[in-house]
Amino acid sequence: MKFTQKFLPLLVLLASADAYATDGYFAHGYGVKSQGMGGVGIALPQDALAAAANPAGMGLIADRVDFGVTWFRPQRESELVNTAGGSKMFDGTYDANDTENFIIPEFGYNRAINPEVSLGVSVYGNGGMNTDYKKVIPLLGTTPAGIDLIQLFVAPTATWKITPSNTVGVSVNLAYQRFEAKGLQNFAAPIGTPQQTSQSPNNVTNQGHDSSYGAGIHIGWIGQVNDNVTLGASYQSKTYMSKFDKYKGLFAEGGDFDIPSSYGVGIAVKATPALTLAADIQRIEYSDVDSVGNSINNLLLQGNLLGSKSGAGFAWRDVTAVKVGASYAWNENLTVRAGYNHSTQPIRSSETLFNILAPGIVQDHLTFGATWVLANKSELSFSYMHAFEEKVRGPGAIPGNFGGGDVNLKMYEDSLGIAYGWQL
């Protein structure tokens, strides 16, 4: 426990660094080992970050400590076409990569209290979103636009082995968010003017960073069907967050930005003594959070002001992520991994205008990883992820009262992680 007391406050501080995730705005996987296998983890716990995918996994990893860091590099771009009534006045390609390198730390600790019960904690970046445009987008404002969102989870976890082959677990997700928006002056016209679009114009843009806190519950089960097959299931409730007061004129319900619920199932199969195959299916319910799921048409067609209960959001659809991975013990010291992750597209072609700020459009991820066993029960792990370039074209996404035109989004990502862990 002395290790945890010493390093956990430092990790919480470090985890406030910017992050940008990939299954929508959730990470494709949690923990460097999982990230190297396409993000699988519901039925295959591998380290003390296991609670992020399934709390029950912490009951199967024994006593250990893990910490790591991932370098993340998203490449974001927006293109405007046929703007300003066809005059093409604002046409052009807008690069959102003025900030493009992000560091995402992770930490996990677990201890078996007795043969049936374990207690632990996992600390990780749940997700995030960042755009930082290099030049002004006249449709949005008078200074370079962008947003910066990070979500940090601290998840104390308890597990119980209810039978020799069945383990259940529960985490309390203690969440922290930080957000900033800039360059959206066109949505901050004063109250009473014909151009008014927000119920609180002074709280739309360029207010610096604001913080939000909240909590939710994560429960899970893992069952050993036989010596070769393991099944898992996990449910994470919506995480109810305090409001972003500085941006109560931007987000629906006066600055509310809860973290959506998610659930999934997984399977792990020991195909040979050296080869393990695993697969997860995860559903993330983005549309259930008004600030994420509401359409921009709530403003443009229905006249609901930004910040109101029915205010506009990013119109994200719910996402289903399918993850598959393989782990092969090359010898007693080296394990290699590979995986693939595909998520459904959260952004409709008709909703690309507001998603200039949040182009979370990548869908296909290819991953690789490896672990070397070192002395004294310690190990060093690596992972690499490439999210292939994805485009979403938005013909007519700019409404006529904004001059009309198309908004096309493009994005790809790379990440490289390293982690160190050891059995206690």
Image: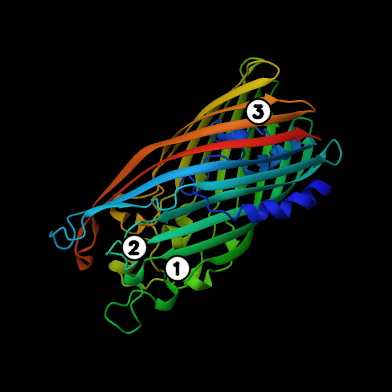
Q: Position of residue 17 (x, y in %)?
A: 57, 54
Instruction: Identify the amino acid type marked 2.
Output: Ile
Say which label, 3 or 1, has the lower sequence index: 3
Q: Position of residue 215 (x, y in %)?
A: 64, 59
Q: Which mark is residue 230?
A: 3
In the displayed structure, would residue 200 be above or below residue 383? Answer: below
- Mark 3 packing: few (<14 Cα in 10 Å), some, or many (20+)? many
Taking 92 as reference, is 251 left or right? right
Task: Give the numbered dot on residue 296.
Answer: 2
Q: Position of residue 100 (x, y in %)?
A: 44, 48
Q: Are marks 1 and 2 in contact (CB under 8 Å)?
A: no
Could you tell me which secondary element the residue under label 1 belongs to? helix
> Would residue 1 be seen by someone viewing this image from the given angle?
no
| Among the 4 quarters of the image, the one containing residue 266 | top right
Q: Where 411 falls versus 273 (above or below)?
A: below
CA–CA distance between discs 3 and 2?
A: 44 Å
Which amino acid, mark 1? Ala
Q: Is residue 210 visible?
A: yes
- Packing grade of label 1 (10 A; few <14, some 14-19, many >=20) is many
Circle 3/circle 1 CB separation < 8 Å = no
Q: Residue at x 54, y 27 (%)?
A: 325
Image-based side of 91 in relation to 259, left or right: left
Residue identified by numbered label 1: 252
